[in-house]
Amino acid sequence: MKHRYIGFLVFISLFVVSMGCSAAVGPSNESPQGQQAADGQPQRGGTLKLMGNGYVSYGTVDSHRASFSPPNGFSGASVNQVVKRNIYSGNYDIIPDLAESWQVSSDGLTYTFKLRKGVKFQNVAPVNGREFTADDVEYMIKRISADRSIVPEKWTNLFTRRSDFESVASIEKPDKYTVVVKMKQPDAVFMHNMATTGSGVFPRELIEENPEKLIQDKIIGTGPFIQKEYVPDVRQILERNPDYWKKDDHGTQLPYLDRVEKYFYSGGDTSSAVAAFLSGQVDALSSAGYFNTLTFGDKETIKKQLGDKVYYIDSLGSSFSHLRINTNRPPFDNPMMRKAAYLAIDRQQIADAIVPGGAVPTGLVPPSLTGEGAYSVDELVKLPGYRQPKDQDITEAKRLVKEAGYEGVSVEMNTSGSTPQTADLVSLVKEQLGKVGINVNIKLNANYQDHLNEMIANKYQITYTGHGASPDPDEYIYKHFHSKGARNYYKFSDPKWDELADKQRAAVTLEQRKKAVREALAYHQEIVPNIPIYSALNQAAYRTYVHGFGKPVQPDDNTIQFDVYWLDQKR
């Protein structure tokens, strides 16, 4: 029995399950569609210059310990995965990368990966071009899992994906090109977690040359580009890896480009980025995340000045904005108060005011994952809390606040004040909650890390934050709300929720998975452990001389495969 999970293309930080019954999965045709197919054989050489939104406050390119997107975007051009998603096929199957093939036992409990022979890490100290082997795959899985033999105990909480591989019982290596992963029970998201870009393969030497065993700004992998410079929130410079293992369908050594230069802009002001794109300083412009979307005005300006010299890729994203609720502190330990706040929020008003032209209302699982059971936008706008006008919701919210005995209660909402858009958004939330008798006092932290530290320390009542995630409902359902979830900053615990979260993980077929996801989403509306607001669109504008990728129908988690980008030298 075989099923797949749809991926999605998140252009963050500069563009920033498959199961089978003993069936071998071999190489798949992943030739780019669209531009390359229309324009023939790619040309070699040149420098691709891109600009997108940056994240200075994360301070790391360590994608092993990050569920959020920026580190994946920084490392994605330099590392490979064991398996990845085919972003060019239109259906986003999981396909081989560093693995040549894999097999899954009929009971779903044993995965056998056959690795490519002769693949080398980049010829950079301290690795110096040594061969990639099964040891590196085992190290990747164990490090993401915060295994005590690799990750110092004091850093466990930093590894927010540590629950990704908790179903793994053992890892065996019959030889240096074979990895056998045995499971405790069937896990519908194991292959998804292997295929997400956060599961890139870094060499042990890179990790262990730092006494803290944490990566800050250095990247080494088996990928197409070697990082030459990285200045957080400013730029990242990459040059061709002359020893890259991969060739295209014509036998031409990849990558085509000599160099990739990424430049970052911060905050929600896209004007400087648009100006750089219009003047030709950069060849491509991206915006994604929570505020950094291209507005209707930006697109109109670009269209007016460049006309048919530009094309766009817009898609639904996985990034979403929401209110996290501390269900262990009054007044939100009372589910009636959580439901009242859920009903009071006017999501459309917030999206229109904060990200004009770049967002849609979202449920707990973003609409980009409707194929996995998420509510579509059309379904959401008919539900309580989303429907317009808001009169009925506000009336019901006032009733709940009164019945809970909290009329006129004051609560503190803390968040990161690093962008003007955040301040504007929480001001709208304050206004909307005030209409139903919940008075909000706003506390703005200096940066996102301080804000995150307060969440982890449980020092909040209600907080606004954004969330970038992987292309699977498990990220939202299990990792954030299961009592064992690595990203359960809420300290939320509900036995029924745990049961539903476990159920969607154990689903065997796609239909069973979708049904289990819907059950969890329905229960979410009853217990309201958080309040989803909107999901930002992923947007990118390219000069027409930039080729080598397909137009996605869904976004994918930072799988920007620069090895197949190329430039038309005639331009």
Image: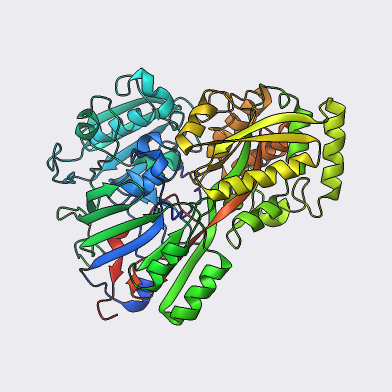
Q: Position of residue 87 (x, y in %)?
A: 42, 58
Q: Quadrant of residue 460?
A: top right
The colour style of the image is: rainbow
Quadrant of the image for the C terminus?
bottom left
Looking at the picture, tell me which residue is in the foreground, 67 or 514.
67
Is residue 371 in view from this perspective?
no
Q: In the figure, is residue 347 to the left or right of 106?
A: right
Q: In the figure, is residue 49 to the left or right of 15?
A: left
What residue sits 44% from the left and 56% below the top? 11
Q: Position of residue 129 (x, y in %)?
A: 13, 43
Q: From this view, report whether residue 257 is shown above or below residue 207.
A: below
Looking at the picture, tell me which residue is in the foreground, 242 or 48.
48
Q: Quadrant of residue 434?
A: top right
Q: Position of residue 304 (x, y in %)?
A: 50, 80
Q: In the figure, is residue 201 to the left or right of 86?
A: left
Looking at the picture, tell me which residue is in the foreground, 426 or 51.
426
Is residue 170 in view from this perspective?
yes
Q: Quadrant of residue 29?
A: bottom left
Looking at the picture, tell me which residue is in the foreground, 212 or 21.
212
Q: Position of residue 40 (x, y in %)?
A: 30, 77
What residue sits 22% from the left and 38% below the top? 177
Q: From this view, report whether residue 308 is shown above or below residue 565.
A: below
